[in-house]
Amino acid sequence: MSIRVRMFASLRERWQIDQVELKPDGIATVADVWETLTGQAMSERILAAVNMEYARPDTPVREGDEVAFFPPVTGG
Amino acid sequence: MAVKLVEGSFDPWRWLLDHQETRLSPGSYGATASFVGTMRDFNDGDRVEELFLEHYPGMTERELEKIVAEARDRWRFLDALVVHRVGEIRPGDPIVLVAVWSAHRGPAFDACRWIMEALKHRAPFWKKERCAGGSRWVARNTDGY
């Protein structure tokens, strides 16, 4: 089992990641996922979801979870 | 309660009427409030030729349903309909419809406005504009109040 990570909109283009599977080793939180993928600290401007529910940088992440990162939303 | 994402152009007034005729019984509601958002051909001083609306399939629907459920906890209304476009959109096309039916005008007006503002703040949609000079992501929504 792994962690599925998705990026949307400008983040997908910036990091060239649409969807990727990540080994859960050493990953405990949403911020850990972001840092593993990008090598950067997670800024306040980045929104995240775990299993399609809004999450925070310190939200726990487990094997089998889907973690998504996206910029501020602009619908409507 | 209904939440729908549609690809391709839609007629919000037809959706509103269809929903009303199939889901509400005549005489049960005294107020219908609706909001329709339409694509402009200008933004931030530039002419916009086309818009691409990206979303997060699954989460977007879930978040919209949650917004409607939260509105239902706050106001006594009979029914609500939210329809939102995804994909390519042209200037003049409707993007979003929010309609709320209630016995009296207060809950319909208030819930319609609240649902729209919550959608703008929380529903995972992202707009990419195509202008003459190239494409750009819209950084943030304008304030509603």
Image: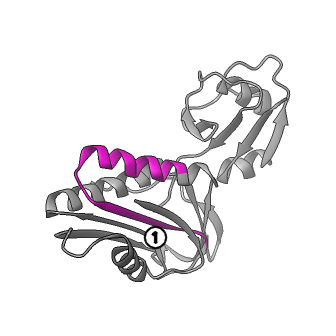
Neighbour class for label 1 at 10 Å: few (<14), some, many (≥20)? few
Chain letter of disc 1 in the image:
B
Magenta region, residue range: B62-87
Residue B30 image offset from top left, x and y in percent: 16, 70
- The residue at the point 39 percent across, 65 percent down is B81
Q: Quadrant of residue A62?
A: top right
Q: Is A23 above or below relative to B96?
A: above
Q: Which amino acid does label 1 sit on?
A: Gly
Q: Position of B138 compared to A31: left or right?
A: left
Q: Residue at x 57, y 71 (%)?
A: B6
Q: Please, what secondary structure does the residue beneath circle 1 have?
A: loop
- Specify whether residue A17 is in view: no
Q: Is residue B98 depicted above or below B139 in this figure?
A: below
Instruction: Give how far across and how far down residue A34 sits, in percent.
Output: 71, 31
Q: Is residue B43 or residue B23 the one in the foreground?
A: B23
State whether residue A14 is above or below residue B133: above
Residue at mark 1: B45
Q: Where is residue B92 in the image (x, y as percent from the top left)?
A: 46, 82
Q: Splitting the image into 4 quarters, where does residue A65 fall?
A: top right
Is B28 on the left or on the right of A13, as rendered? left
Q: Which residue is drawn at 35% across and 62% down?
A: B80
